[in-house]
């Protein structure tokens, strides 16, 4: 009977508390340690694949810049949950005369070439590469048979050719080309901004 009285008193006390006091009550609980939380979170194959793609893209974009006349500004990868797309991006700094569709397409091809280097040649290279990034080292019965093809549909690469950040207000013209890793040059979406 004492337990029921205690629970009733606690619940009654909360019900009687003004709404503004309720968030304060929740905040007074024990503080959660960030490392404990991180250590308890599982890492999925999606997380692991994105991390591997980010690492590969950093090297591929740096190689593409070094092989040409560009300066790498930034590269990275993020996941867009609203449309279930994984987007890799690389921004290159070019003088205004070199901010053209042709330069964007050339940089796109260089980055993709560096990413899929070592994959089987031909139309399946991007699928094979993405399957190797996002899959287990061993095949399991639950693994989609077309994992690489599905990932090729969901991974996009966006290349931006623009000015130095310090000059962006004076000369904001940028060329952006976006496509799948297996997109032919004619299949890229091109746009000019600024």
Image (tube, rainbow, N blue to C red):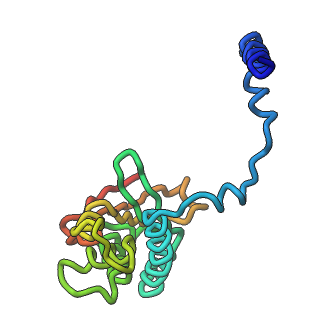
Residue 119 appears in the figure: yes
User: Between 150 and 177, which is closer to the camera in this rendering?
Assistant: 150
How many numbered callouts?
A: 0
Residue at image coords 71%, 58%: 36
Residue 95 appears in the figure: no
Residue most toward the top?
16
Residue 11 percent coordinates (x, y): 73, 17
Above or below: residue 9 compared with residue 167:
above
Above or below: residue 108 compared with residue 47:
below
User: Between 29 and 110, which is closer to the camera in this rendering?
Assistant: 29
* Residue 62 in the figure: left or right of residue 146: right
Above or below: residue 127 compared with residue 47:
below
Residue 40 percent coordinates (x, y): 63, 58
Above or below: residue 48 compared with residue 112:
above
Residue 159 percent coordinates (x, y): 39, 66
Residue 37 percent coordinates (x, y): 67, 55
Residue at image coords 24%, 87%: 120
User: Between 33 and 13, which is closer to the camera in this rendering?
Assistant: 13
Residue at image coords 77%, 17%: 1
The picture quadrant where one finds residue 143 is bottom left
* Residue 25 in the figure: left or right of residue 74: right
Residue at image coords 18%, 78%: 123
């Amino acid at each position: 009977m004492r337990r029921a009285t205690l629970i009733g008193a606690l619940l009654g006390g909360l019900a009687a508390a003004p709404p503004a006091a309720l968030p304060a009550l929740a905040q007074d609980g024990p503080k959660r340690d960030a490392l404990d939380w991180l250590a308890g979170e599982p890492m999925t194959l999606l997380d692991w694949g994105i991390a591997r793609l980010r690492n590969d893209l950093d090297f591929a974009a740096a190689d593409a810049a070094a092989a040409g006349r560009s300066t790498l500004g930034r590269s990275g990868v993020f996941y867009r949950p609203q449309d279930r797309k994984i987007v890799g991006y690389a921004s290159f700094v070019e003088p205004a005369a070199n901010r053209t569709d042709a330069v964007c397409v050339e940089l796109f091809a260089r980055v993709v070439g560096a990413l899929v280097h070592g994959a089987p040649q031909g139309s399946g290279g991007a699928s094979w590469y993405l399957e190797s990034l996002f899959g287990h080292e061993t095949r399991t019965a639950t693994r989609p048979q077309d994992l690489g093809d599905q990932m090729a549909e969901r991974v996009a690469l966006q290349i931006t050719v623009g000015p130095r950040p310090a000059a962006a207000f004076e000369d904001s013209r940028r060329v952006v080309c976006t496509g799948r890793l297996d997109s032919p040059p004619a299949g890229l979406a091109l746009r000019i901004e600024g």
